[in-house]
Image (cartoon, rainbow, N blue to C red):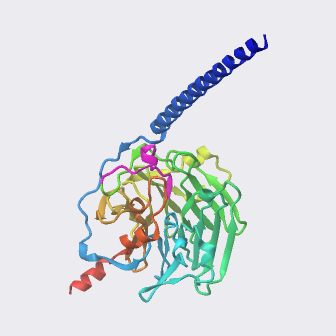
Amino acid sequence: MQRCDSLQHQQKTPDRGIRMLKWTLRLAIILIVLLIIFLVAFRLRFGGGEYYPDISSSPTIAAERISAPIQLPFPPGMVTSSPDGRIFYTYHMLHQPERFADATVFEWVDGAGVPFPNQALQAEFEGAMGITVDQQKRLWIIKPGALEGKRTRLLAFDMESGQLALDHTFAEGEAGFAQDMRVSPDGKTVFLADTGLFEFTEPGLIVFDIESKTARTVLAGHPTVSPQGWLMRKTDGDPYKLAFGLLSFVVGVDGIAITPDGETLYYATMSHDSVYKIPTAALLDESLSENDLANTIEFVGKKPLSDGIELTTDGDIIITDVENGGLARLSPDGTFSTLTKDSAVDWADSVTVAPDGAIWFTDSRLTDLIDQFAVPSDEAEMKDKGPYAIYRIAPLQEANAGED
């Protein structure tokens, strides 16, 4: 009897093992099917889009007016000009320049980049994205923190003394993807563009009161600050996607500019076909509902898929054209024209207009040096593909003088 029970036990043990193996295989198949369904749904939701029509035309700026006076070992990010014509720039934070460089924020002085305000403070600027100079001669730096799980930090330095004028850390979850910014002429308010993370988080405009150090996010998720369903092309014509096509590169509101009188803020969403403007008085009015605030927005005109924007003294809007490697212009009446385009420019990123009328813009080389999973190139590849340029377009009168 004991022998019979033993034989039955031996038979049941293999049977149980086979059943467990079958259930494991079934579970694995179910998980694989669910993963495929998830990836397909993810691809349909976040990896689609239509190609944006090319609205560029023949460039209106002669090639001889364009130069590249600033040559760098690593790709630049932002460039800005002060009221007295000083030029400041950064290395682009997505390339993680702190891996190789001992400075990331510079002033261009006598043909060389000088760490600003000094070398000792450069460790504080790791992850710096946007920079701008206000009428009070303060250089502002924004360090968006969301990608690193940190809180966003805003700093300002007096240009003359190099002394810290403001150091503010935003609340948790606030201004997580803030990039471009402008300061009101009276020096009381900073307006920032929070791009959001692709389509996962809402973009919006941020109004920061310098005296009280308080911030409000407005127009969060509004159609004018949110990406449209456009699939961006690289300058070589290939679609700009991540994770082997699962995720299209789409970005919310990015470029902003403010009129000299401080009355109007212009803004442009990268993955969007239009430029808009809004009265700064409405942005500052905390009594307005989101709906009432949205009713003050005005359409300005059509644009290319863009990054940075800036205003000229004539009221024209200069817009970077990331698909065509150059700049476009939108006049106050909405007339569009192409200023420059060059397939050698991988990503026309930031633009500034100096007091003398010269236009400076950066090529941050984002599609060339960032891989499918947003990992930047190593130092060897980066140096091999360099140097990297900040371009200058000479004022028309300067170009004419050079021809005489």
Most extreme residue toward the bottom is 110
Residue nearest the observer in this picture, 244 or 9: 9
Asked whether the viewer can see residue 188, the reply is no
Q: Is residue 248 magenta?
A: yes
Q: Is residue 275 magenta?
A: no
Asked whether the viewer can see residue 215, the reply is yes
Residue at x 45% of width, y 43% of height: 246
Q: Indicate left or right for 65 with 121 as reference.
A: left
Q: Indicate left or right for 104 with 238 as reference.
A: right
Residue nearest the observer in this picture, 325 or 58: 325
Q: Percent from the top left, x then y, of residue 110?
A: 43, 89
Q: Percent from the top left, x then y, of residue 66?
A: 30, 75
Residue at x 50% of width, y 47% of height: 226
Residue range (magenta): 237-254
Quadrant of image for the N terminus: top right
Quadrant of image for the C terminus: bottom left
Q: Is residue 377 above or below residue 225?
A: below
Most extreme residue toward the left is 404
Q: Percent from the top left, x then y, of residue 288?
A: 64, 49
Q: Is residue 80 above or below residue 160?
A: above
Q: What count of labels does the image hold?
A: 0
Residue nearest the observer in this picture, 334 or 192: 192
Q: Indicate left or right for 184 with 44 as reference.
A: right
Q: Percent from the top left, x then y, of residue 258?
A: 51, 65
Residue at x 67% of width, y 59% of height: 215
Residue nearest the observer in this picture, 265 or 44: 44
Q: Is residue 7 above or below residue 188?
A: above
Most extreme residue toward the top is 1
